[in-house]
Image (cartoon, helix red, strand yellow):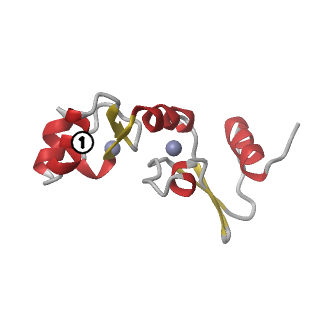
Amino acid sequence: MHHLALIADNRDAELNTSVNTRSYHVSHLCHNSRCFNPGHLVVESAHHNHRRKTCTGHKVILYGDFEYHPCEHGEVEKMRRCILPVLRLGPGRHVNGSEVIYLMDAFGWRW
Ligand SMILES: [Zn+2]
Ligand SMILES: [Zn+2]
């Protein structure tokens, strides 16, 4: 199903790489296995695909000019970053318990 989505997007060259090499996977940048948006699919090594799992459940945090993106793919391998929900914080914005944990991660704060 995902392969069809890539063919529809004229990315069959990218797909051939995955077909001819066992170690290549079609990754979901948005972590939604039922999503068929070709813009959310990328062919990459199994290693990179597995690394994306660490981003599942995380959020991009916007706070003023500060942006925290938990996905390391964009910086380390110059690859497509995961597509994650955005948590936009402003002055006086109250955060819930799980959001506090995201903030701790983002700013490197420790308990
Ligand atoms: Zn998607
Ligand atoms: Zn990621």
Q: Quarter of the image holding residue 102?
A: top right
x and y, in percent, of residue 35 in the image? 28, 38
x and y, in percent, of residue 43 in the image? 31, 43
x and y, in percent, of residue 75 in the image? 56, 57
Foreground residue among 10 and 63: 10
Left or right: where does residue 97 sit relative to residue 86? right
Amino acid type at image mark 1? Thr
* Residue topped by disc 1: 17
Which image quarter is the C terminus in? top right
Foreground residue among 86 and 55: 55
Q: Which residue is painted at 77% across and 44% down in the image?
A: 104
Name the residue at the bottom extreme.
65
Image height check: is 10 above or below 19?
below
Q: Which quadrant contains ligand 1?
A: top left
Left or right: where does residue 77 sit relative to residue 70? left
Disc 1 on helix, strand or loop? Answer: helix
